[in-house]
Every structure is written in structure tokens, then in C-alpha cells.
Amino acid sequence: MVVHLSLHDVARVAALADLFPTKTPAAIAAELLSAALDQVEAAFPYVQGQRVIAEDEQGDPIYEDAGLTPRFIDLTKQHSNRLRASRQAGA
């Protein structure tokens, strides 16, 4: 994967690398991207589904999430499996 950053963002990554000299700019960029993806996933709104999947401590029903989160997780697993298989086939 190739990611193109604006000049300003490249400068900010370089500034972080100066602040944290044990990290390479590539490692900093990877950590930032990972953190951003975690935040995107956490920001997906919960949408109550129809199916009860558990009960809370008071015995109240907990409904499945019918929003984007389960689909995102499923697609992530699919892509991960495909990438892993591709990597193994090339090794």
C-alpha cells in the first residue's frame, strides 16, 4: 500500500520523528494510521438490531448491533484472511 500525504502532514510526521528519535517516520505513520482506524471504528454508531444476544446484570436484553461496526469487523476479517493467504502463497 502506498499512501500519499500532504506536505504539511509529512512535515508533522517528521516533527514527531524529531520529538521521538527512536521511532522512524514510517513507524510513526503506521502508529498514527492504526490509532485513527481504531477511532473510526469506535465512532460508528450503535444501531439496535432485532435479535437479543445477551442479558445485562439486571436481566435486561442486549440487542445485536445492526450498524456499521459488525460489517466493518467482518470485512476486516475477510481482507485479513485474503492478505494472509496471498502472503503465504507468495512465500
Image (tube, helix red, strand yellow):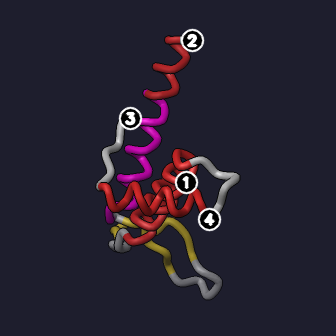
Numbered range of the magenta stretch: 67-82
Q: What residue is at 41 percent from the left and 59 percent from the top?
A: 11
| Residue beneath disc 1 | 28
Say which element carries label 3.
Answer: loop
Element under disc 4: helix
Q: Is residue 71 left or right of residue 34?
A: left
Separation (CA) of disc 1 from disc 3: 16 Å
> Badge 4 local density, few (<14 within 10 Å), some, or many (20+)?
few
Badge 3 density bin: few <14, some 14–19, many ≥20, Cα 10 Å: few
* Residue beneath disc 3: 1
Image quadrant in which you'd find residue 57:
bottom right
Q: Secondary structure at mark 1?
A: helix
Give the spatial CA distance, label 3 vs label 4.
Answer: 26 Å
In the image, what residue type sits under mark 1?
A: Ile
Q: Which residue is mark 2?
A: 91
Q: N-terminal of the two: label 3 or label 4?
A: 3
Which numbered dot is residue 19? 4
Image quadrant in which the N terminus is located:
top left
Pick whichever of labels 2 and 3 is earlier in the sequence: 3
Instruction: Please give the name of the residue rendered at 55% of the width and 69% of the height, measured from the top-left corner.
Output: 54
Give the class, few, some or many, for how many residues have Cα within 10 Å of label 2's Cα (few <14, many ≥20).
Answer: few
Residue depicted at x 34% and y 68%? 50
